[in-house]
């Protein structure tokens, strides 16, 4: 099953410094049919103006993954962590028992990010943060795991949930497969370009909620950059 969610159908709000689009109910946007997809709770498509950003604020009991599509985001938190994550790279914050953080676009250009929240499988663990680069060449033509709750996923950033965040870059005409499993929930968004899944076209920034699929096959209609969450 594939439920296409075109970009124009997403909720959202434009705050001037932040133009936010919500794939799921968030803040003042509420749609009872778009509350979650398995343990995936939030997928926000945020455009952040230069020299602005999210001031310090708290979170707890949530796995928060930031995928930078353009520009860069600078993180700082009350644990003493600070880092800059650039386009194509990923940062992960496990909020655990509680963390306060800020996320600023300190660049002279607009920054665009996907902000992804996944429910953790347990509570009561200490908060943590990490970031790492994922050169796009390593993802060319196939899916690479960016963040994972499974121990056997190599150097992927760890998250405390039964889920993976994977990415791929495909040239027009190329295909890639991902072994999903019929009992899993996948949510896929092209960061750029257009793709096709089982005859359905998915354009840049559209969402595709996928279930009851053993192996997911994606074909690029244009050069494409893809982000996918595989969740319980």
Image: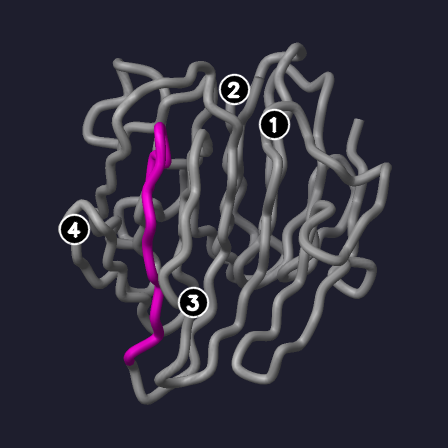
Real-space Cα separation, disc 4 to disc 3, in angstroms: 16 Å
Q: Which residue is mark 4?
A: 81
Real-space Cα separation, disc 3 to disc 1, in angstroms: 35 Å
Q: Nearer the viewer, residue 20 or 179?
A: 20
Please tell me whether residue 41 is drawn above or below residue 88 in the rendered image: above
Quadrant hosting residue 185: top right
Q: Which residue is mark 3?
A: 54
Q: Nearer the viewer, residue 195 or 210?
A: 210
- Mark yes or no: residue 83 visible: yes
Q: Residue at image x 72%, y 64%?
A: 12
Q: Earlier in the sequence, mark 4 or mark 3?
A: 3
Q: Which residue is mark 1?
A: 216
Q: In front: mark 4 or mark 1?
A: 4
Q: How many marks?
A: 4
Q: Kindly state the secondary structure of the residue where label 1 is placed.
A: strand
Real-space Cα separation, disc 2 to disc 1, in angstroms: 6 Å
Q: Earlier in the sequence, mark 4 or mark 2?
A: 4
Q: Which residue is mark 2?
A: 179
Q: Are marks 3 and 1 in contact (CB under 8 Å)?
A: no
- Judged left or right of residue 78, residue 119 is right
Quadrant hosting residue 8: bottom right
Q: Earlier in the sequence, mark 4 or mark 1?
A: 4
Q: Earlier in the sequence, mark 2 or mark 1?
A: 2
């Amino acid at each position: 099953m594939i439920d296409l969610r075109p970009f124009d159908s997403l909720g959202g709000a434009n705050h001037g410094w932040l133009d936010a689009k919500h794939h799921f109910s968030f803040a003042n946007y509420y749609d009872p049919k778009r509350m979650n997809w398995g343990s995936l709770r939030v997928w926000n498509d945020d455009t952040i103006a230069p020299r602005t950003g999210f001031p310090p604020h708290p979170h707890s009991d949530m796995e928060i993954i930031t995928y930078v599509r353009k520009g860069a985001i600078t993180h700082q938190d009350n644990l003493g962590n600070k880092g800059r994550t650039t386009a194509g790279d990923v940062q992960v914050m496990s909020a655990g028992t509680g963390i306060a953080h800020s996320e600023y676009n300190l660049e002279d250009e607009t920054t665009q990010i996907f902000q992804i929240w996944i429910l953790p499988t347990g509570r009561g663990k200490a908060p943590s943060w990490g970031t790492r680069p994922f050169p796009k060449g390593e993802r060319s033509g196939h899916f690479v795991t960016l963040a994972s709750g499974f121990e056997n996923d190599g150097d992927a950033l760890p998250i405390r949930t039964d889920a993976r965040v994977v990415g791929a870059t495909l040239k027009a005409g190329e295909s890639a497969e991902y072994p999903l499993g019929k009992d899993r929930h996948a949510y896929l968004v092209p960061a750029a370009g257009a793709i096709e899944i089982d005859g359905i076209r998915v354009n840049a920034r559209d969402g595709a909620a996928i279930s009851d699929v053993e192996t997911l096959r994606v074909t690029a209609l244009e050069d494409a950059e893809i982000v996918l969450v595989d969740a319980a």
